Structure formats: structure tokens, C-alpha cells
Amino acid sequence: MRIREVSDHDLEAIVSIQSKSPRAARWTLADYKNLMDDPMGLILVAEPDTAAPPTIVGFVGFRRVIDEAELMNMAVDPAHQRQGVGRELLAEGRRRLSEQGARRIYLEVRASNAPAQSLYYSVGFVLLSRRRDYYNGPWEDALVFSLQISPPAGVPPSL
């Protein structure tokens, strides 16, 4: 799997994957372009090594504010789910955000989205809280997760 930063010509593929993923946030092409152009934004895409020509099968978008980051949106094409694509996107995002000085990642996920929650738990996210009626279409609670990616300031890394 190849994980790389998004480029302008990838945006339509991202919107297409999002449209096949009913639980992903509904963003427009302009929303992704704005995040891509934001100096604190990071969008990564996944391409299988075996695809010729390269085909995007998943994406993740983050926004960083000082030493915290938020996972804004993520989706994997249904034909490529449960093959480690999401896990690799999260691992590379974590690595890059840590290099940029982020110490923690936050995200919200629909309370009914058990597959995503399972992935987040498996990579070390912890549940922080519930936001009542956070999502609409349909109305649903959000679960707020957090992942510590580097020690808080002034705390030496553990061995």
C-alpha cells in the first residue's frame, strides 16, 4: 500500500469514495480543496501497490491546531474495506502529525458506526465522551475519541 499526500487531481476520487460510504461526513470538492490548501490541513490517500494505473482506495483528512489535531473525515472504498487500508492511513497520519508537533488526535464518530469504532480502538484511541444529537440525517449521537501520539509537554517519553 502506498500512502501519500493528496493532489488536486485526487479530489474527485475522494468525493467518489465518500459517496460510496454512507457513514462518512458529507463534504464537497471545495471542502477538500480548502483543507488541502490549509497550511494546518493534511489529506492522505491510499493506493494499492498492485494497481496500474494507481487507483485511490481510501483517504483521511486531518486539521492541526498548535499541538492537537482532529480527524475530519475518513473513508475506504467498500471494495477495499477490512484489508488494512484505514489502519495504514491512520498510522501514516499519526507519524506525520507527530513530526509536525501534534501530541493528540481527536475525532467524532457516529454512535452506530461499530466498524470505525473497532478500528479506532485497535490503534489506541480511547473514548472520551458522547455528544448528544451531534449528527443529523439521521440524528445521532457522536462518540468523541482521543489518541495520545506523543508525550505532553514536559513529560519525558517512557521507555
Image: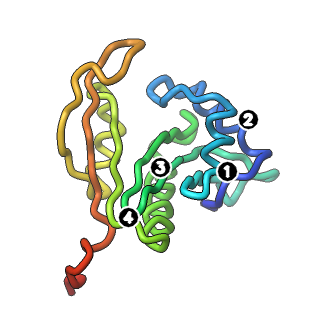
Q: Which residue is mark 1?
A: 37
| Residue drawn at point x = 54 percent, y = 40 percent | 76
Quadrant location, the C terminus = bottom left
Amino acid identity at mark 4: Asp
Q: Which residue is mark 4?
A: 67
Judged from the image, the secondary structure of the residue bearing numbered disc 3 is helix
| Residue drawn at point x = 32 percent, y = 29 percent | 110
Q: Which residue is mark 2?
A: 12
Instruction: Point out the frontmost of discs 4 and 2.
Output: 4
Check disc 1: other Cα within 10 Å, few if <14, some if 14-19, many if 20+: some
Question: From what the image shows, is residue 88 above or below residue 80?
Answer: below
Nearer-N-terminus badge (1/4): 1
| Residue drawn at point x = 21 percent, y = 51 percent | 126
Q: Position of residue 55 (x, y in %)?
A: 72, 47
Question: From what the image shows, is residue 13 above or below residue 83?
Answer: above
Q: Position of residue 134 (x, y in %)?
A: 31, 24
Instruction: Point out the frontmost of discs 3 and 2.
Output: 2
Q: Are marks 4 and 2 in contact (CB under 8 Å)?
A: no
Amino acid identity at mark 1: Asp
Instruction: Quote the CA–CA distance across marks 3 and 1.
Output: 23 Å
Nearer-N-terminus badge (3/2): 2
Residue 112 is left or right of residue 78, and the answer is left
Amino acid identity at mark 2: Glu
Question: From what the image shows, is residue 99 above or below residue 114?
Answer: below
Judged from the image, the secondary structure of the residue bearing numbered disc 1 is helix
Judged from the image, the secondary structure of the residue bearing numbered disc 4 is loop
Instruction: Point out the frontmost of discs 1 and 2.
Output: 1
The dot on residue 86 is: 3
Question: From what the image shows, is residue 94 above or below residue 19?
Answer: below
Nearer-N-terminus badge (4/3): 4
Q: Quadrant of residue 145?
A: top left
